[in-house]
Image (cartoon, rainbow, N blue to C red):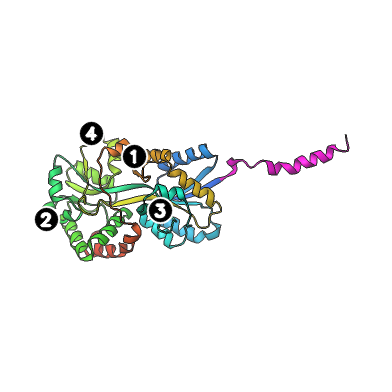
Amino acid sequence: MRLFRPLKLLVISISLPFCFTPAQAEELMVYSSRNASYLTPMFNRYASETGVSVSYTINSSEALIRKLEAEGEESPADIFLTTGALNLSLASQKGVLASISSRILKKTLPEHLRSKDDDWFAIAKRAQAIAYHPEKLSESELQTYANTYAALADSKWKGKLCLRSSRTEYSQSLLADLSHRYGEAKMQTVMKGWISNLAHSPVSDDLELFTALETGVCELTIAYSYYLPRHLLTHPNSKIKLFWPEQKDGGVHIDITGAGVVADSDNKELAQDFLEWMLSKQAQSQYSRLSMEYPAHRRVYPDRAVAKHGKFKENKTHVEEFSPYQSTANAIARKARYK
């Protein structure tokens, strides 16, 4: 018996590394421009359900894209998650995202909410609405005089309009879309009219726009839909409402929060699983509640705090069709002195 005991111990010591491959040892790294307060609950839930921990680095989209380019094959990142389809399109052009084949993502998302090269996918969307104070304006008045974004250039709105700065990425997306939609000549007229109608210099944040409406600085503005539910969390008695323009034309401008698998990731299958999980009905409902955005999933309803602001027709032009107009829009903005 003593002769066999060392051999038995030797077999056990060799077998151990091959018997234990716990899921807890797996980890994903996310590079994101998104607020950590919206991401952390999602990452924690994914870890709880799968055993895969998720770490993240937060920075601006531009900085993260440069970081991915500089790191190359040495990058620890597995997923790039950001706001703005223009940022995702840029990441795609820079070659830092991998094309993946996923029946789940294609079945779940409409074509205009995913890359034509299958290297980025929307996880949420937001709409550019016209926000207004009902004590100053009626919905019927808006239906008549503000039923398009271009209508806000009419002299009727002189001294009554507030806008977000053209330099913010959210404005860049809208301006590129409208330049594609209206054409360069009309967009020049529109931007000149907007600037002529301003009640106040452009601001850097949508929440500032709601403060301007509340205090009577202006009567209407263009703002992303998800900012109003957030504003109402701290201003529950606010009377500000949303009006949906372009309902007889192309539909309201849509932008997204989206993600893609990093091209140099060593965990592409796991990263793809995470993206598919983010598009599950349960995850979509939770993320919609956290961020106050609209779910990207075809069959998931928005959170009640979001849905109560009304239904609308959205513009389904693919971002890859209007992203080339970003430089045109910037040139028009500079000429119109839209800062």
Three-letter amino acid code at the position of disc 4:
Asn
Q: Residue at x 53, y 50 (%)?
A: 269
Label 4–label 1 contact, CB within 8 A: no
Q: Which sits earlier in the primary sequence, circle 2 or circle 4?
A: 2
Q: CA distance from mark 3 to mark 1?
A: 29 Å
Image: 115 above or below 28: below
Task: Tell me, for residue 237, which label it has, or none.
Answer: 4
Task: Tell me, for residue 60, which label it has, or none.
Answer: 3
Q: Residue at x 28, y 53 (%)?
A: 315
Q: CA distance from mark 2 to mark 1?
A: 38 Å
Label 2–label 4 contact, CB within 8 A: no
Image: 51 above or below 153: above
Image: 10 above or below 82: above
Three-letter amino acid code at the position of disc 2:
Ser
Task: Tell me, for residue 113, which label it has, or none.
Answer: none
Three-letter amino acid code at the position of disc 1:
Tyr
Q: Position of residue 136 (x, y in %)?
A: 13, 42
